[in-house]
Amino acid sequence: MQLELGNILVKDIQFGDKTEFKNGIVYVNKQELMDNIKDDRLAKIEVDIVRPGDDVRICPVKDVLEPRVKVEGGGQVFPGIFGNAEMVGSGKTNVLKGMTVLTVGKIVGFQEGIIDMSGPGAEYTPFSQTINLVILCDKVEGLPQHEHEEAVRLAGLKATRYISEIAKNVTPDETFTFETKPLTEQLSQYPDLPKVAYVYMLQTQGLMHDTYLYGTDVKKILPTFLYPTEVMDGAVISGNCVSACDKNTTYHHLNNPVIADLFARHGKDLNFIGVVVTNENVTLLDKERSSNFTAKLVDSLKVDGVIISEEGFGNPDADLIMNCKKIEALGIKTVLVTDEYAGRDGASQSLADANLLANAVISGGNANAIIELPPMSRVIGYIEASEIIAGGFDGALKKDGSITVEIQAITGATNELGFNRMGALEF
Amino acid sequence: MVKELEEVVDVPVVHVCTVVPISVTVGANRIDPAVAIPHPLGNPQLNQDEEFALRTSIVEKALKALSTDISEQTVF
């Protein structure tokens, strides 16, 4: 399966009479966009544009997405949400690079995130560096939580799809080609190089903790095999922002750095075989079953090593360790990518579970670290949520608008795909 | 808390816990497996009588664990 990604570099987003791409600028007809995403369950939709360096705080953030559109090849981006879950990952896809679509709105639970476009908080989130089309959605009175979450999730996906259409006939500024051959051919392509697979753990624990694969709820799947390019075409979608620091937004999935880095070394010093996606469920039997299937799939791939990325913390640490132990027991090396909840002073046990076989671990940082976020002249959303979101606490919000939170509250701060600037070194 | 109560207050403690491997890792001595992380002692798919029976069985197992002498970490 071969995919050519064509990046169209976005210099700015502006509102205009017609939704189009011209001279590096994405023009958006606000009314037409809102007509495209309207939903009886949403009482209010507002659209804003924020840029790097703006004196703006966005809260509570649900998801961040990147506009991508199929130019050649089967299926549609975000398959299973749009189209008939036709397989994606081949042909050509255009990307509006440098911008995002970002959803915000009244709190669904207590899990959403904060994004600061400037100041100390901006250092912790990648989305302070992108031009963001912010979609604020508020629900109608009395809407149940699950419906609320779904309505906002679909609004983000529909807005992203609407914007992406303007990229279809634009010549990209840069193109990158990725190819994974059918398994038997891929296994024999580079006989002298170590074969490496990627185990992609996805958070699947219910409301605000769910992930979708080709539109299906990942808690209901058994682990399965994907071509890496399927992920680049939106096969994996976030419904998950609990403790926003280490949850993968849809943008993270589309731009998964583990996949990008494995491709960068593919054919040079390793042979990237493919991706095993698995879940993180809420019963012990589910955890055992999924890790058994993951290990069996990895075994059948006959690889030499595996990178395993976790999503979230706490009980998913048990899924991570089960995957590690069961794959290591096959004689296959593992490297784990995770983050830490080591207390505000960093002195506590970092993960809820541990094992001696987990002897190669990459950390995205300590989510319990405290940060002071100074007041911003403008807030998009509802800043009072900072007192109840994960990482926030009673008294977090000061009268002057400044907030004190754990970096756990900042979208993407300790991302466990490595999509951040923080890490940890042991001396 | 499980370990602290046993060490400081010196009373036997049962950890009713869904993810048994975590309970083992943190060092609980008496472990009573629970149903699921969002509902450790219940199961919304059962009717009221069935759920009550399930809950009773978990609590009774915990009481039995409390009164059982052990020499190593034990999952009941």
Image (cartoon, coloured by chain):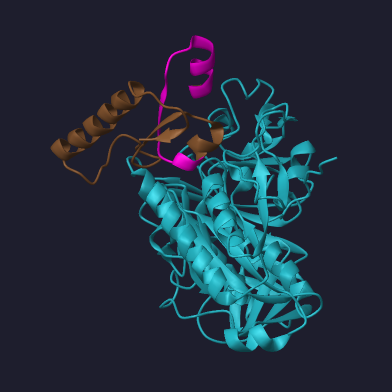
Q: Is residue A91 left or right of residue B21?
A: right
Chain in cyan in the render: A
Counting the numbered discs, the total is: 0
Q: Quadrant of the C terminus of chain B?
A: top left
Instruction: Find chain B in the image and tell me its colour.
Output: brown
Give the residues drawn in magenta, as a range. Answer: B2-21
> Outermost residue, right direction?
A427
Q: Residue A411: where, in percent of width, then height?
A: 64, 45
> Outermost residue, front direction?
B71
- Residue A330 seen anywhere in this rendered image of the structure: yes
Residue at 48% in and 12% down: B10
Q: Quick check: A337 above or below A427?
A: below
Nearer to us in this view, A62 or B9? B9
Q: Residue A266: where, in percent of width, then height?
A: 75, 77
Q: Quick check: A163 above or below A183?
A: above
Q: Residue B52: where, in percent of width, then height?
A: 19, 33
Q: Residue A187: where, in percent of width, then height?
A: 65, 83
